[in-house]
Image: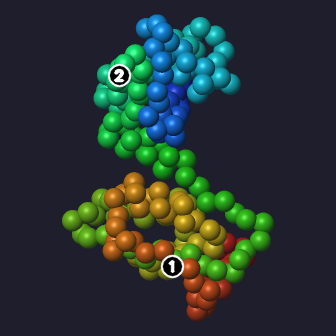
Amino acid sequence: MAIKNNRHETISNLLKFILVGGAVAIAMTSPYFLTNILFKKSFRRSYKNLKEKKKFYNTFYYLKRRGLIEIENINNQIYISLTKEGKQCAGKYQIDELSIEKPSKWDKKWRVIVFDIPEKYRIKREAFRGKLKELGFAKLQESVWAHPYECDEEIDLLREFFGLSDKNLQLLLVENISNDYELRSKFKV
């Protein structure tokens, strides 16, 4: 179980590194240069020994075999980028780690999510609701949820991950919700 979690973490870190960097370009000097430079740049703190380095190489080539990363050699310049499947996988890891920060002082405004995801996308709708619960949103109605803290970026990431349009998902900034006593006590604001 621990070995699987370590591999999962290494895959997650590598995909996020490439996602953040966009396409990575590296001048080719040797066959191992590619994994060496990526390893040093992305895992400097976690590099402990040769075993760790080997695990990184194996993970890198595993991602390549699975079609999650793409490597192109153009004029002795190597370009590494995520494939469409790789971006989806990296997005999943971002979604898994998503959280909403609590500021030191509440701005007395509610962030209200209103969504309408059609019945034919029921699984997506239930997964979206589950993520809202996980992020600490309070349910006002089945498709109306509220949170007291700034969460625009988190909602944009969810919108992109779940493939929701502006028509499917609205984020409202509301100053007053009638009878918000229960909400205030839930969030302790």
Q: Is residue 138 left or right of residue 189?
A: left
Q: Is residue 33 left or right of residue 115?
A: right
Q: Is residue 55 visible?
A: no
Q: Is residue 109 visible?
A: yes
Relative image position of residue 61 (x, y in whole percent)? 39, 18
Residue at left offset 37%, top offset 19%: 75
Q: Is residue 103 left or right of residue 81?
A: right
Name above or below for residue 91 compared with residue 45.
Answer: below
The C terminus lies in which quarter of the figure? bottom right
Which residue position holds label 1? 172
Quadrant in which residue 161 is drawn: bottom left
Residue at left offset 54%, top offset 14%: 36
Relative image position of residue 116 (x, y in whole percent)? 33, 74
Total label count?
Answer: 2
Q: Which mark is residue 43?
A: none
Residue at left offset 64%, top offset 18%: 47
Crowd around label 1: few <14 · some 14–19 · many ≥20 (10 Å): some
Residue most extreme to the bottom = 178
Relative image position of residue 107 (x, y in whole percent)? 71, 77
For discs 2 and 1, the disc positioned in front in the rendered view: 2
Badge 2 or badge 1: first in the primary sequence:
2
| Amino acid type for the residue under numbered disc 1 | Leu
Residue most extreme to the front = 75
Residue at left offset 51%, top offset 79%: 172
Query: Between 30 and 174, which is closer to the camera in this rendering?
Result: 30
Q: Which mark is residue 74?
A: 2
Local SS, label 2: strand
What is the C-alpha distance between the residues marked 2 and 1? 47 Å
Name above or below for residue 101 compared with residue 11.
Answer: below
